[in-house]
Image (cartoon, coloured by chain):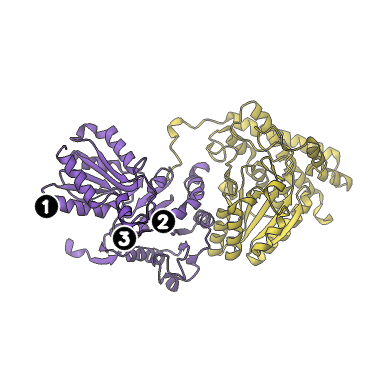
Amino acid sequence: MENSLDKLHGTDLLYRMMLIRRFEEKSAELYTKEKIRGFLHLYIGEEAVAVGVMQCLKAEDNILSTYREHGHALARGVDAGSIMAEMYGKQEGCSHGRGGSMHLFDIKKNFYGGNAIVGGHLGMAVGMALAARKQQQNSIICCFFGEGAAAEGEFHEAMNLASLWSVPVLFVCENNLYAMGTAIRFSHAVTELEKKGPGYGIETAVVDGMDVLAVEEAAKKATEMIRATGRPFFLVCNTYRFRAHSMFDAELYRDKAEVDEWKKRDPITRLQKSLVGLNIITNEDIEELNGKIETEVQNAVDFAEAGTWEPVEELKKFVYT
Amino acid sequence: MDALIKNTTITYREAIKQAIREAMQKDEKVFLMGEDVGRYGGAFAVSKGLLQEFGPDRIMDVPLSESGFVGAGIGAALKGMRPIVEIMTVNFGLLAMDQVVNNAATLLHMSGGQLNVPLVIRISCGIGRQLAAQHSHSWEPLYAHIPGLKVLSAGTHEDARHMLQPALNSPDPVIIFEYTFLLNAEGEVSEDAGMVDITKAKVRRQGKDISIITYGAGVYKALEAATVLAAEGIDAEVVDLRVLRPLDNETVFDSVRKTHRALLVEEAWGAVNVSSEVCARIMENIFYELDAPVMRLGGQEVPIPYPKHLENASVPQKEDIINAIKKIMLHD
């Protein structure tokens, strides 16, 4: 893994994870100030998954995600200001303000949203991959979902279809151990989710989702396989959400001690330590990154604040073309 | 002019098949997927022979995964294809309802106008073949409730033949309802009629005394009733709504402005059906044009029973239409 750890690349990974972290901390703050409303699901703790996987995708590849998708959007390069404006509900938002936190879309980046029906986007991912195959495009459809979605019928239907039709989907399961407040042991008879791939004839790997370099390496192998064979791949990333499920969650279902234990594996601290330890970057570099990110997040907030409300007269837009 | 229009008599099944074949010949992006559409030839033999003509990549058999393959249809539509997804019968359609409501009908809006879902879903539905409570549904109103969908009902051979192409041309998702009890029935189709205008209802019979406003399985029954009534001196107009969402108010209003009376007929359960909405729109917009209260004939509110006599009694029949109209005309 040493070879992937040059300063440029290491700093880039770190920057992307830190940006997601800071952006979301700011979002939580803005939620308490009632600037952001509705549901707000934070990705804090899981940053290594989105950042690691996204490194291996090309511009022509497509991404579908869940309602916990700020991280994926940022990692994909969707403009932070347009995401923040979307969460404010302003028409300068990436979905014109119509979607909010759970429905971030940016088709120029091939970012196909934010789907808030658990498992609801898996079938679409298969269909997009089918279209890619029919049109002889060599693009991958990358579909993020949680272990909660793996209990849905949609997961099983989509895995079967993708394998049966031999289409290029990268299924990325972010196993953060809790479907809202229900621990995996209460929702899956077989908790080693990687065992579910082979049942559908799908090549599968499991990786430590708290280690961005491990995720990147696993995603690299997965995407290489998909590009070579056109077949789907199932990548299970074991991770943990440090924050509550949403802003309404009192976290009655897990111990603080458990959360603290996982925080010791914080993917950002981990990468920082290893980069500094290997003398690839210095603490001053990290400080510099922090400053840069602070400015970027503040700019995003300023952009959202300066955004405008869509006129009520336009209410019925976007129902029919 | 009439001499130039070539009419042929074909079955409803053949009309649908010709529509699919023609669409597939015209555009390579069009493909059909559904349960048993290929090797079996279609559960109702609609697509029989198409697999041999177009091959398995374009006539795709799918596993029994309604949510999965409707979702896949949406995904394929998002990425430039023109899928025709067949849901074998409307009762299985509920398993895919989440995909239809939360994705197909919603993506344009949620993405702030960035995405189109040019998907066509064909669903067979309706009562009449003694298939009992889980296979006889008329659920057009469920779909007609959803903004973002265009909902069409092919109540005639003409529409079965000529509705598919305009549906495929739509940038927005279209649901087409087809009626299994009509499959073997023969009817006239004009080959040169061109595409159906899928924004408009259609007056199937001109009349001056009363408007029978209906769709789907009600259309031929209404036409037959009108023929009987004509012999008795009552001149009924038959309006086929045809487009259940968005509803075409004007064709309905124009008809009622002419006849000043309306009977609404459909097979879906009576409460909260399409007629409820049409009735409300007549009241809200042209109440003072009416010479009699608007009446409705809908399905009885019971799961559809198996025995033929009870099945028949569950939905309005020709005689019910005739009786209702006499009642209205005689102010009885």
Q: Nearer the viewer, residue B218 or A161?
A: B218
State whether residue A313 appears in this view.
yes
Q: Residue at x 42, y 66 (%)?
A: B42
Q: CA distance from mark 2 to mark 1?
A: 37 Å
Residue carrying label 1: B231
Extreme top residue here? A33
* A103 and B92: which is toward the camera: B92
Chain bearing tag 3 is B
Mark 2 or mark 1: which comes first in sequence? Answer: 2
Task: Count residues near mark 1 (Cα–Cα under 10 Å), then give few for <14, some for 14-19, many for 20+.
Answer: few
| Vertical comparison of B71 with A182: above or below | below
Q: Mark 1 falls on what kind of element?
A: helix
Q: Amino acid at mark 3?
A: Leu
Q: Colour of chain A?
A: yellow
Q: Chain of mark 1?
A: B
Of all chains, the one bearing label 2 is B
Label of residue A132 in the image: none
Disc on res. B135: 2
Name the secondary structure under disc 3: helix
Side of A22 relative to A120 (left or right): right
Give the image location of residue A220, x and y in percent.
72, 58
Q: Earlier in the sequence, mark 1 or mark 3?
A: 3
Residue B258 visible to the viewer: no
